[in-house]
Image (cartoon, grey):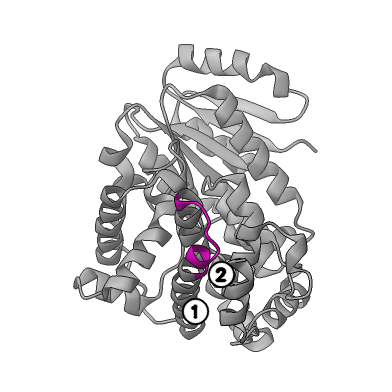
Amino acid sequence: MKPSIIFLDDDQRFLDGLRRALNKYKNEWDMTFVTEGEAAFRQLEGRRVHILVSDHDMPGMMGDTVMETVRHRWPATVRVMLTGRPLQTVAAALMGVAHRSFSKPCDVDQLALYLSRVLASARAFKTPLVVDLVSGLSMPPLPRSILLAAREEQLEPGVQIAAALFQLATSHLSAESGLGAVDDHSLRLALDQLRQVARDRLPQIENPIVLALWQESVEIARTVQRMAKAAHLSASKQRELTITGPFSNIGSIALAEVLPGTYAIDVGTAGTPERWAMEKAAFGASGLEVGAFLLTAWGFPEGIVDEVRSQGVTIATMGNHPREVRVLAGARDRSWPELVEIEKQLAV
């Protein structure tokens, strides 16, 4: 059965142009084009829809309202927003309801590539339930204590940066520029949006495993930044890895968030690489595989997704992998005590 995609826009001429441009994918995707939110809902009620692509500014029902409804009623559907407004002006409204946004008019080839990558990543799961559950996450799950600190503007500087980096996935500020090009202004905007989320979406209770994984992620971010510098990587690659570092745990965090009871019993607070094996046994997919899917849905570059997915790196085989992958593996594998020695090797 072909994967199903719905395209929603009140402008019929835009839809007709999109239909013509995507005609070459008609044998790969089941595509439906509708002009009203209610028509999209009727389609979603009748069948499994993998992706919804919606315009933002529409009469009657705005795109973010459509996305919010879909998020609650059909959370397994990946949600993509098209908007003609500057991304900075709508980022706060889109954060938490859409996985990815594109400026309108968008590059159709770029949109098609993104859709293809998301669908291919979803097909890699042998357990559909897992991808259906984590698809509902259009932003990284953050622990209550971190959000409370953000709301009160009491985050320590290191955590502020890591929190802002987490938000970049759904800040919709870097969708076309690439994460390596994110500047300090974008980080500040992302942190402001994090504070808004803390005010609007504060969890009622703390998930201790999500909190522990978050704290580990912050430490990974700090370690990978130090190791990338020691490895003499380019400034852009150092920035990219600094962003990738905290996201290397995002799949485990997602599993602990959507299946908290099972995760606590079957995985608990195990460290890597044992954690990934235990996740695979419990859910049919490791946190690295889940993370790769989420980062793909959030629009991360393919290189970063591959770095997060890579898990076959050991101290003995480090020489067989690109330097940036070795840096990330050395920073995130908590069973390796020889980080100083690894840094020395990478600096050669």
At 32% from the left and 44% from the top, the residue drawn is 91
**Left or right of 20: which side holds 66?**
left
Q: Which residue is mark 1?
A: 216
At 19% from the left and 73% from the top, the residue drawn is 152
Q: Position of residue 175 (x, y in %)?
A: 44, 40
Q: Residues within 10 Å of mark 1 (few under 14, many from 20)?
A: some
Q: Residues within 10 Å of mark 2 (few under 14, many from 20)?
A: many
Instruction: Give the quadrant of residue 158.
Output: bottom left
**Left or right of 321: which side holds 142?**
left
The answer to whether mark 1 and mark 2 are in CB contact below 8 A is: yes
Q: Which residue is mark 2?
A: 249
Question: Nearest the camera: 44 or 233?
Answer: 233
Measured in 3D between alpha carbons, the distance from the residue under mark 1 to the one under mark 2, in whole angstroms, is 8 Å
Q: Position of residue 215 (x, y in %)?
A: 44, 79
Q: Is residue 56 above or below residue 145?
A: above
Question: Nearest the camera: 252 or 134?
Answer: 252
Dot 1 or dot 2, earlier in sequence: 1
